[in-house]
Structures are given as structure tokens and as C-alpha cells.
Amino acid sequence: MLVISLFFTLEVVAQVKPVTYSNHGQAIKTEIGTFYSNKIHEIILSPDATFKFWSRPSTSCFLWRSFKGTWKKDNDTLYFSDEYQLDQDDVTATYRKNNRQSFFIDFRTDKGHRLDNKQIKINYIYDYNSQLPNVPRYFTLTANNTLEIPFKDIPKYHQLTSIKIEYQLSDSLKRLDYLTTNQYVNLRQHDIPNIISVVFVEQPKNEMINRVTKGVIRDGKLFIVSTEKSVSKLKDSGENFEFEDGYVLEPEID
């Protein structure tokens, strides 16, 4: 291990400028501009042993993404290490459907504690293509922490895509979520099931995920060959890397 560590140190010291490997993939030309894939397009190695992965699918910087971490080299193999945090959802919901012509929503906490606050704010969210504005409403929960909303009381019900809830769980804790089974909160695919059980998670957990991406230099190109990461107890919603097939070292600019 001592020999390898010294090798890594010498590699970093010898490099005085960042180097960039790039591959933007196949260009997609349209009437409104040129686009590329959502994969990683640039791999930048800095002398301080840090790296950046850049994805630039268009000229608009709003679509750019970057990831950073540390790198090390062993002969022709590069190891890129980064980490990201997973956060447990602080609101969960389950759905089912019956013939009732109303939404019936019940609320509770994951620890079964009493909900002292009976006031809740709701926003009706409509399909984006309908151009309808969100409609806010305020409701009072029953003693059993339930809420019933007849379909006929919801403006433009047949354009409804999601129900946004805002609830003050305590003086310092607020819970916000969108109730829907549509893939997007503002694109309608189907009716929202009308029986909804909402659980407020009182103390959401979090967890750090460590990820190592391995690359190999062959014939002057950098190829990414694998990515491994630690196993999570939480739902892993972290963004996965996708790479182009081989990256070319860009010439240095003086």
C-alpha cells in the first residue's frame, strides 16, 4: 500500500494543469438547435486529485449537470470516488379506489402521535396543457384526522393532476407533498385514486452513499468500465452516471 500511495502522490505532483477527456456523442440537430445525450461528456482531472464529470446536452446551461469527487491512478486504471446523501421521504402515501364520488384522505404520523394541528392547506394542481392556475383551499381535519372532498367541489376536476398538501406538523416541522399516481405532478395521465392514506414521517433518516467508478486507458482513450456503490437501506434516488464509449484527451491550451 505504501508503494501505491507514493505512486499516486507522484502522479498528482507531476500534473500541473487540469486535463480533460471528452466525448459529446452523436449530435441531434433540430429546428431549435443542436442537442446531445444526457450522458457524461467531459471528464476533467485536476492536479489536486479532484475530478469533475460534466454533462452538457445543449448550449443552454440550465440543462448542464456536474458531479465531483477525487481520483487516483494505478498504471492505466483510474478510480473516481464520490458520495451523495440519501434522504428518507418525510411524507408517504398509499392509494386505492372505490365508487365514492369524493376524495377521502386520512392522515397520521409514522410513530402514531396525535395530530394537534387540524388545519391543512391544499392546492389543486392541473394539467400543464390546460393552462389552468393552481387553486388553493384551506380545510379542517376531523377529530379522526380525515378529510373528505367531493369531486363536485373541485373546480375543473377532470383536469386535476395532483393535490398539493402543506401541513404544519409542529412549530418547527412542516410537511409538503404532492398526492398523485401520475408520473408527473402537472401532467395528467389518469384520475387520482380517491382513497388516500398519508403518513407524516416524524424523523426522516439519511444515509451517505459511496460510489467508485473505474476507467481504463487504452490506445490513448479513457473507457469507463464499471461503477460500484455501497448498499443503501433507504430508497436510492441518486442520479446514476451514463458514459459515452471512450473519451479522447483534449490538447492542452497554453
Image (spheres, rainbow, N blue to C red):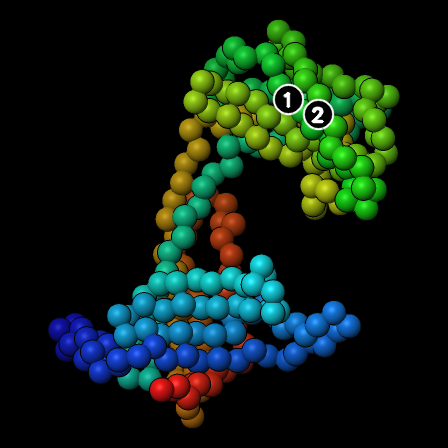
Q: Position of residue 14 (x, y in %)?
A: 22, 82
Q: Is residue 79 above or below residue 110?
A: below
Instruction: Quadrant for residue 101, please give it.
Output: top right
Task: State the image coordinates of residue 204 (x, y, percent, origin top left).
Answer: 44, 33
Q: Name the secondary structure under disc 2.
A: strand
Q: Which mark is residue 225?
A: none
The answer to the question of whether label 2 and label 1 lie on touching residues, with beta carbons closer than 8 A, is yes
Find disc 1 in the rendering and name its residue.
121
Q: Residues within 10 Å of mark 2 (few under 14, many from 20)?
A: few
Q: Amino acid at mark 2?
A: Pro
Quadrant location of residue 151?
top right
Q: Is residue 81 left or right of residue 201?
A: left
The reply to whether residue 7 is visible in this rendering is no
Q: Which residue is mark 2?
A: 136
Is 77 placed left or right of 92 in the picture?
left
Label 1: state its secondary structure: strand
Q: Nearer the viewer, residue 54 or 133?
A: 133
Q: Mark 2 vs mark 1: which is more N-terminal?
A: 1
Where residue 138 appears, x then y in whole percent?
68, 18
The residue located at (42%, 92%) in the rendering is: 219
